[in-house]
Image: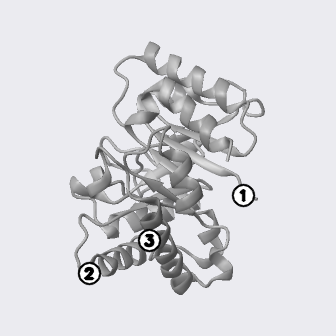
Amino acid sequence: MKRKIIVGNWKMNPPTLDEAQAIFKKVKRTAANLTSTYVVVCPPLVYIPKFSPLRLKRLLKTSVGLGAQNVFFESQGAYTGEVSAPMLKEFGVTHVIIGHSERRAAGETDEIVSKKVLAVLDAGIHPIVCVGEAERDIHALYLDTLRNQIRNSLSRVPKKLVSQLIVAYEPLWAIGAKDAMDPAVIEETVIFVRKVLADAFGQENTLNTLVLYGGATNFRNAPDIVSRGKVDGLLVGRESVNTPGFVELLKAVDAL
């Protein structure tokens, strides 16, 4: 059985390093006792060096993967304020979130996402590629939107590297909502996402491509989403910095 993966996207939280270290310490302690779940923490960029297993020479001891929330598609150059995939790898970053809905809302296009995905793969890092429709319509036209977004965002991915991808399905209308999407509907959508991937890269090549769900997840609904929704794990936003809730979420998913 594949290990489930839980990705905590801290976004621009917490406001201080002391708080960040406290969250990371508790998550790491919990992750060390999980048997079937792998945890990736994606803190704000400025905190990454503090949690780097390479810089702290704890690579073989770490129980938590280190992720970044964004990346640039060039390896170096005159790009003020940007950070490259090779730079992130220097600090032991193993995963990068790409194409999050908040980044797309700020102007990030499928074309930009596709460049970032390739740059991250070339650096030997796992891209967590976010896709999802803004709204659902009764005629199911949102499926065309989702299909095109997946194809365009992954247009530069070589077939030999597609197994390194992680696709995070996060419907925009569910992010920050009171309730998560119905697990039965999640399962239907995940089947569709897997079909789009298989059509684009071949079924054999996508057998190990993970598909996550993101949107209003918490420790109460997470087990149902993972089990009934047939996802490989979760992309968790606001709950990932609510340490007690996130710890309970990890334990609940691991117990499945």
SS category of the residue bearing label 1: loop
Query: Looking at the image, which residue is at 44% across and 50% down?
Result: 76
Q: Which mark is residue 237?
A: none
Q: Badge 1, how many Cα within 10 Å: few under 14, some, many 20+?
A: few
Amino acid type at circle 3 is Thr
Instruction: Tell me where residue 71 appears, x and y as whole percent.
Output: 42, 49
Amino acid type at circle 2 is Leu
Q: Which mark is residue 2?
A: 1
Relative to 149, is 33 on the left or the right? Answer: right
Query: Looking at the image, which residue is at 72% across and 26% down?
Result: 57
Question: Residues under labels 2 and 3: Cα distance?
Answer: 13 Å
* Disc nearer the start of the sequence (2/1): 1
Query: Looking at the image, which residue is at 72% across and 30% down?
Result: 32
Above or below, comparing residue 249 to residue 71 in the picture: above
Relative to 225, is 101 on the left or the right? Answer: left
Above or below, comparing residue 127 to residue 54 in the picture: below
* Disc nearer the start of the sequence (2/3): 2
Amino acid type at circle 1 is Lys
- Circle 3 sits on which residue? 189
Q: Which corner quadrant holds the N terminus?
A: bottom right
Instruction: Tell me where residue 196 appears, x and y as whole percent.
Output: 48, 80
Q: Badge 2, how many Cα within 10 Å: few under 14, some, many 20+?
A: few
Q: Which mark is residue 141?
A: 2
* Disc nearer the start of the sequence (3/1): 1
> What scheme was used to colour the molecule?
one colour
Which residue is more in the foreground, 136 or 11?
A: 136
SS category of the residue bearing label 2: loop
